[in-house]
Image (cartoon, helix red, strand yellow):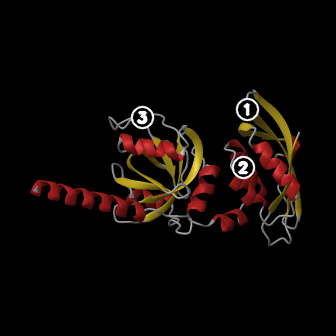
């Protein structure tokens, strides 16, 4: 019977350490990650290094390896189990939606990042049931092809760092429109609420908008009207309006071009701009 005792002791140790492992990563947004620029992060998580990704909203944790990427990290889940956990974060459906995450390194550094959930491109880890890689952006990361800083990822990086308010305060109306389109595209209620926070918006209009958000599948900014293309608010302006054309796809419908109007206001020239209303026609 000695083997049985040993086996039970062993199992208890395994269960205990598993539990310890889980609880030490059960983090919330109250424990933000460090806001570190990609120029530094790239050396903290060099190519082929392994680290953990924590998604604070679900509390889920999975392990990845950085395989490539020069302007952000291209990573892959380590095992089939890690892939399954990642898929759970996306409610079982792979998506380009940006999510605030905290990258936890082997020496326990916690860095604010933003991931998407769509396997694509080059593969490399056999047997992990993940076809390709996915991207994790950090402060100042840029995309593969265009070399642009992605407004959705930068929003989520600041959210992961617990600095969303100061980030939003520093955004120009133009940058806020870009963030707004991200919120529509990924039906992100918390982004919409955050952008309306502290503005003189109509609460009924906000609730209507949030209900409408559920009917949207995808959205992207097409253009701003030509004659207004160059216009930016003057230094002293306290209100600012912008007409734009956006492509919107509603559920069970095709992509349709819609004109919309953004209205911004601020209390004084030194105060941050706030979106007050959004009309779509
Ligand atoms: Zn990438």
Residue at numbered disc 1: 251
Q: How many marks?
A: 3
Placement of 191 over or under 186, stated as above or below: below
Whole-angstrom CA distance, mark 3 to mark 1, is: 31 Å
Decide which of tag 3 and tag 2 comes sooner along the chain. 3
Residue 104 makes an appearance in the image: yes
The residue lying toward the viewer, choosing from 18 and 51, is 18
Q: Which residue is farthest left? A: 2
Residue 262 makes an appearance in the image: no
- Mark nearest the camera among 3 and 1 is 1
Q: Residues within 10 Å of mark 3 (few under 14, many from 20)?
A: few
Decide which of tag 3 and tag 1 comes sooner along the chain. 3
Residue at 63% x, 56% y is 155
Please tell me the numbered disc located at residue 122: 3
- Mark 1 and mark 2 in contact? Answer it, CB < 8 Å: no
Residue at 87% x, 55% y is 204
**Side (left or right) of 248 relative to 113:** right
Residue at 38% x, 43% y is 81
Placement of 58 over or under 244, stated as above or below: below
Placement of 1 over or under 117, stated as above or below: below
Does dot 2 land on a helix, a strand or a loop?
A: helix
* In the image, the residue with mark 3 has its CB under 8 Å from the nearest atom of ligand 1: no
Residue at numbered disc 2: 178
**Side (left or right) of 107 relative to 5:** right
Q: Residues within 10 Å of mark 2 (few under 14, many from 20)?
A: some
Placement of 74 over or under 112, stated as above or below: above
* Residue 233 lies in quadrant: bottom right
**In the rendering, at what x and y percent does residue 158 appear?**
60, 61
């Amino acid at each position: 019977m000695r083997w049985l005792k040993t086996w039970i002791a062993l199992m208890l140790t395994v269960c205990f350490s598993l539990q310890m492992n889980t609880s030490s990563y059960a983090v919330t947004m109250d424990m933000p990650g460090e806001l570190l620029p990609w120029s530094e992060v790239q050396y903290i998580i060099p190519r082929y290094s392994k680290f953990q990704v924590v998604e604070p909203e679900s509390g889920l944790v999975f392990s990845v390896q950085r395989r490539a990427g020069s302007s952000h990290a291209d990573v892959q889940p380590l095992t089939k189990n890690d892939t399954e956990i990642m898929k759970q974060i996306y409610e079982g459906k792979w998506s380009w939606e940006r999510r605030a995450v905290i990258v936890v390194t082997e020496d326990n550094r916690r860095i604010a990042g933003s991931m998407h959930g769509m396997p694509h491109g080059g593969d490399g880890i056999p047997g992990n049931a993940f076809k390709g890689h996915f991207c994790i952006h950090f402060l100042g990361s840029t995309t593969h092809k265009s070399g642009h800083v992605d407004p959705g990822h930068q929003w989520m990086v600041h959210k992961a760092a617990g600095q969303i308010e100061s980030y939003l305060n520093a955004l120009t109306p133009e940058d806020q429109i870009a963030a707004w389109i991200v919120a529509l595209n990924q039906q992100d209620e918390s982004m919409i609420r955050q952008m309306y926070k502290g503005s003189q918006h109509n609460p009924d209009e906000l609730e209507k908008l949030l209900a409408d958000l559920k009917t949207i599948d995808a959205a992207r900014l097409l253009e701003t009207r030509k004659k207004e293309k160059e216009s930016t608010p003057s230094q002293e302006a306290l209100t600012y309006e912008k007409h734009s054309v956006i492509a919107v796809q509603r559920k069970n419908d095709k992509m349709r071009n819609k004109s919309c109007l953004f209205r911004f206001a601020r209390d004084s020239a030194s105060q941050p701009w706030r979106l007050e209303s959004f009309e779509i026609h």
